[in-house]
Image (cartoon, grey):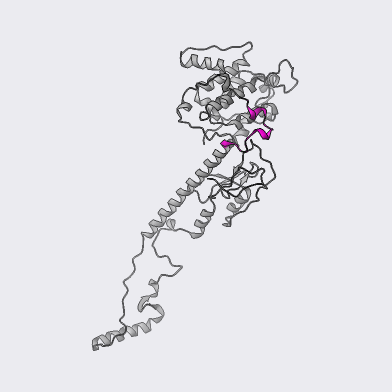
């Protein structure tokens, strides 16, 4: 960390070029240059920038992942946790500058785990030449493509693109007391050492809920505007003729006119009706199924559709604090992301909330994560609320991004 900070200061403050080279050029050189680039350039603190940094400084420069990580036919003398030290250095920077990084701790752990898992071809091989000869880009999957499909897991809710610290050069404190044990890396499976829930997961859930309610508010404001527009377009009705009743003294002319009107009433009795002593033509009497306003077809509000839209957005989301496992019996730990269904508000694991669709009650109509039962209800058009199976341990109380990965085949 001291060496990386020295390089960063030399470039930014003294405006000089720096040549960095260790014995071989693919271990400590990659460490110091990567951390220095992250200190200097805000781009490398984004999800996309971190991928570019690893591809450039580690994979393209020829870091010997097979030998250093001890993956296949390794020599114990060649094994060294060089990349692990780099990942931990990035975590220490994140601890000092929590708003400067777009990715979170889960992102670093995911990358580090799959360096050793050998499930993807991204980190297989000791150099680009070996990866090309083995045709790993054709025969294996890319870690970056896998992580791109789970991007919401890795976004830091505290990240601020326009924050002064985010836009500038980082100045970390390298005093010994600033470095602490990374429990997420070295004590990950000791649940007693971790809090019940991740602060960043709580913030992410609150952010998602606020986004859903804000979108629903825009939808309601739009419908209220349409309703006001409808109320302002009343059709003109014909004037109603009043008929005198209970007349005690009638002149001959008045009696003649009245008898004539009464004869007309008898002839048109089927076409008229009386309300409070006033004769009103039937075609002017509003009924329950008669539209009282002249409107365009696009402005007509359907009660059924409006009711479906209102029920499609959950207002009260379930707390994630005491939920130990998903409805599918998948246990939750400190590093397992708990997802809310935006329609019913219940908590699920990533396997049970693998569907995305737009909600009728959202103004933007952008795809949102929903559970499988709610997805089925939305696609069938049913307005009945869905009640998915609850987790065995839960509480009924409530609480109140976008860079992408660079396309890469390895």
- Point out the image quarter for the N terminus: top right
Q: Position of residue 94 (x, y in %)?
A: 55, 27
Q: Nearer the viewer, residue 273 or 331?
A: 331
Pinpoint residue 66: horizontal percent, then vertical percent: 70, 21
Tell me how many marks there are.
0
Report which quarter residue 248 is drawn in: bottom left
Quarter of the view holding residue 272 = bottom left
Where 173 falls versus 368 (above or below)?
A: above
From where the camera sits, is residue 409 visible?
no
Q: Is residue 194 magenta?
A: yes
Q: Position of residue 327 (x, y in %)?
A: 67, 47
Q: Is residue 35 above or below residue 409?
A: above
Residue sitting at x 39%, y 72%: 283
Residue 95: image location, x then y, percent = 56, 27
Horizontally, is 284 left or right of 217 in the view? left
| Residue at far right of view | 73
Location of the C terminus by quadrant is top right
Left or right of 149? Residue 41 is: left
Image side of residue 71 versus residue 195, left or right: right
Residue shown at the point (63%, 10%) measured from the top left: 23
The answer to whether residue 69 is seen in the rendering is yes
Front position in the image: 331 or 244: 331
Q: Which residues are magenta?
A: 181-200
Verify whether residue 367 appears in magenta.
no
Residue 311 quadrant: bottom right
Looking at the picture, tell me which residue is in the foreground, 153 or 375: 153
Which residue: 55% across, 19% down? Answer: 175
């Amino acid at each position: 960390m001291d060496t990386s900070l020295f390089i960063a200061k030399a470039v930014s403050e003294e405006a000089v070029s720096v040549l960095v080279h260790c014995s071989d050029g693919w271990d400590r050189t990659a460490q110091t240059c990567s951390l220095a680039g992250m200190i200097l350039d805000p781009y490398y603190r984004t999800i996309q920038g971190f991928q570019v940094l690893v591809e450039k400084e580690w994979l393209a420069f020829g870091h010997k992942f097979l030998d250093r990580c001890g993956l296949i036919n390794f020599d114990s003398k060649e094994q060294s946790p060089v990349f692990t030290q780099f990942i931990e250095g990035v975590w220490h920077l994140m601890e000092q500058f929590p708003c400067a990084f777009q990715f979170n701790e889960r992102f670093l752990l995911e990358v580090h785990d799959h360096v050793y898992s050998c499930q993807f071809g991204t980190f297989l091989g000791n150099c680009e030449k070996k990866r090309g000869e083995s045709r790993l880009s054709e025969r294996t999957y890319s870690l970056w493509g896998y992580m791109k499909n789970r991007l919401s897991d890795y976004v830091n809710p505290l990240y601020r693109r326009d924050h002064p610290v985010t836009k500038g050069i980082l100045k970390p404190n390298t005093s010994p007391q600033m470095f602490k044990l990374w429990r997420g890396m070295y004590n990950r499976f000791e649940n007693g050492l971790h809090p019940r829930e991740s602060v960043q997961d709580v913030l992410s859930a609150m952010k998602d809920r606020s986004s859903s309610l804000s979108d629903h508010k825009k939808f309601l404001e739009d419908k209220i505007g349409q309703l006001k527009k409808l109320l302002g377009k009343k059709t003109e009705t014909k004037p109603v003729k009043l008929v005198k009743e209970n007349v005690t003294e009638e002149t001959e002319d008045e009696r003649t006119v009245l008898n004539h009107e009464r004869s007309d009433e008898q002839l048109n009795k089927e076409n008229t009706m009386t309300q409070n002593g006033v004769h009103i033509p039937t075609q002017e009497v509003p009924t329950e199924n008669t539209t009282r306003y002249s409107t365009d077809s696009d402005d007509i509000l359907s009660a059924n559709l409006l009711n479906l839209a209102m029920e499609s957005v959950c207002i009260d989301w379930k707390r994630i604090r005491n939920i130990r496992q998903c409805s599918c019996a998948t246990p939750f730990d400190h590093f397992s992301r708990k997802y809310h269904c935006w329609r019913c508000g219940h908590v699920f694991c990533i396997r049970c909330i693998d569907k995305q669709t737009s909600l009728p009650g959202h103004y933007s109509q952008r795809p949102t994560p929903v559970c499988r039962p709610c997805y089925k209800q939305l696609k069938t058009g049913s307005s009945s609320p869905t009640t998915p199976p609850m987790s065995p341990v839960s509480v009924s109380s409530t609480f109140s991004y976008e860079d992408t990965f660079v396309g890469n085949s390895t």
